[in-house]
Image (tube, rainbow, N blue to C red):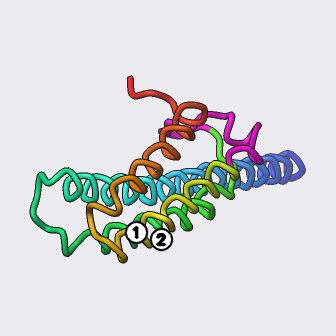
Amino acid sequence: MRTFTKTIVTIGSAIALTAGTALSVSADDKAYIKYRQAVMSAVGGHMGGAVAIIKGDVPYTEDLVAHATGLNDMAKAASNAFKQETSGGETRAKPEIWKDHDEFIQQLKDMQTATADFLAAAKAGGPAAAAEKLEAVGDSCKGCHKKFREKKS
């Protein structure tokens, strides 16, 4: 009877350790996904603010450099946000991010170049000078979303 109890305890411990590991991997994936979503949400927020200023929908031209800086900083953060491969979870990221990771990273580099150019134009000439550069940022976002992001359902 003692051997049976010892075996059950050993098996139970092994199952508990395995379950704990599986849960921690899932928790890690959730944390990485949540971080990525926060970074990309910040990109969207700064993009929306910059577009509203450039279109003249709001008069806050003095905020354009802040939005351009935010876009530039978040473009850099996006590289870290997509270093860790994840699976599952509530995300619109397509598996192609990991299958074609070199291409995806190049898309992020293109976005970083576009946001740096936008920031320089916003600092140098305000909304009029920055409009074309902001369009290039939007194009870099669209290029990546087309291949690497699921459409909203």
Q: Residue furthest top?
A: 153
Of tags 2 and 1, the one toward the viewer is 1
Q: Amino acid at mark 2?
A: Asp
Query: Which residue range is magenta in the image?
Result: 88-104
| Residue 101 drawn in magenta | yes
Residue at point 62%, 61% (across, down): 79
Instruction: Locate residue 48 relative to residue 10 in the image: left or right.
Output: left
Q: Quadrant of residue 20?
A: bottom right
Q: Residue furthest right?
A: 3
Residue at point 52%, 62% (across, down): 75
Marks 2 and 1, how far apart in space?
16 Å
Quarter holding the C terminus is top left
Camera-side residue of 31 and 109: 109
Q: Which residue is mark 2?
A: 73
Of pointers 2 and 1, the one earlier in the residue sequence: 2
Residue at point 63%, 48% (across, down): 107
Q: Residue 101, relative to residue 27: is it above or below?
A: above
Q: Which residue is mark 1?
A: 121
Camera-side residue of 111 and 132: 132
The spot of residue 19 in percent (x, y) is: 68, 48
Label 1 SS? helix
The spot of residue 24 in percent (x, y) is: 63, 56
| Residue 68 drawn in magenta | no
Q: Residue 10, relative to residue 64: is it above or below?
A: above
Q: Quadrant of residue 123?
A: bottom left
Residue at point 90%, 50% (across, down): 3
Label 2 SS? helix
The spot of residue 37 in percent (x, y) is: 45, 52
Residues at marks 2 and 1 touching, judged by CB atoms closer than 8 Å = no
Q: Amino acid at mark 1?
A: Ala
Report how many numbered discs are placed on residues in the image. 2
Classify mark 1: residues with Cα within 10 Å, few (<14), some (14-19) or many (20+): many
